[in-house]
Image (tube, rainbow, N blue to C red):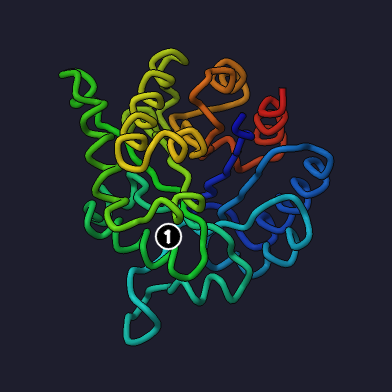
Amino acid sequence: MRAKYIAGNWKMNMDRAGAVELAKALVEQLKDVDNTFMIAPPFVYLDAVSQIVKGSNIILGAQDVTYTENGAHTGEVSASMLVDIGVKTVILGHSERRNDFYENNKIVNSKVKIALEHGLDVVLCIGERFSHRIVGVTESVCALQVKTALAGVSAEQMSKVTIAYEPIWAIGTGQTATPEEANKTHAAVRKTLADMYGQNVADETKILYGGSMNAKNAEELLVQPDIDGGLIGGASLKADTFVPICKFSVK
């Protein structure tokens, strides 16, 4: 039985005071709630939030990492820098990185490998466009993204990898796949993992849903057998919209 995992991606939101206030509220309200919880503030607030969540049941995540080591890479943030301030996991391959910053599967793969080399856990995002969905190639698109992003990643390293299925057409739109549709895609992703690494790895890997999950639809999504949690965007920016999702995850 896979424990549920609820992750909050704050994206480019908050100011320092708001980030600290939200982190404090989550630490207090989730302190007696089981399962796994993660929040990923903007880079500039990671250190401040790190001090708040230290020793709690909330994992500190980052929203990205560069694929190079420290050096002359203006504007980039390395894996070793993230580790140095207490980051435990990193979100990679998010559609906004792929679309807005032209990150292809090769770049995502390089980031996955360097994050794992530095001991970071990875939340690997995959997902299809609406045009893919319409022509019925959702599963093949997701399979290709999984295979290319995890190229060179060993079965042993997969214990540090979580997959987040985010249909691009549902991110931030309020639209969401039906629970049955989402679960069907998750099951197909799990089959891809089984083909790559064997059934044991597939069964142990958490696959999160990230297409506009909120307090109204979370419960019906989280009861699906292959949906192991959620990667939450807008609903993670307030305790009163994020905490209910976290609490649904323990039912």
Which of the two residues, 113 or 23, is positioned nearer the viewer here? 113
Q: Which residue is mark 1?
A: 64
Q: Is residue 68 left or right of residue 5?
A: left
Q: Is residue 65 left or right of residue 59?
A: left
Classify 59 as above or below 147.
Answer: below
Task: Give the residue displayed 58% in from the left and 61% down from the top.
Answer: 88
For the N terminus, the quadrant is top right
Whole-percent x and y of residue 47? 63, 70
Task: Give the residue displayed 59% in from the left and 64% down from the top.
Answer: 87
Q: Say few, some or many: other residues with alpha carbon within 10 Å of mark 1 (under 14 / 14 to 19 / 20 or more).
A: many
Whole-percent x and y of residue 228? 54, 31
For the C terminus, the quadrant is top right
Q: Is residue 241 left or right of residue 205?
A: right
Question: How many numbered marks are there?
Answer: 1
Task: Give the residue displayed 37% in from the left and 47% down from the top.
Answer: 94
Whole-percent x and y of residue 119? 52, 66
Classify 244 as above or below 111.
Answer: above
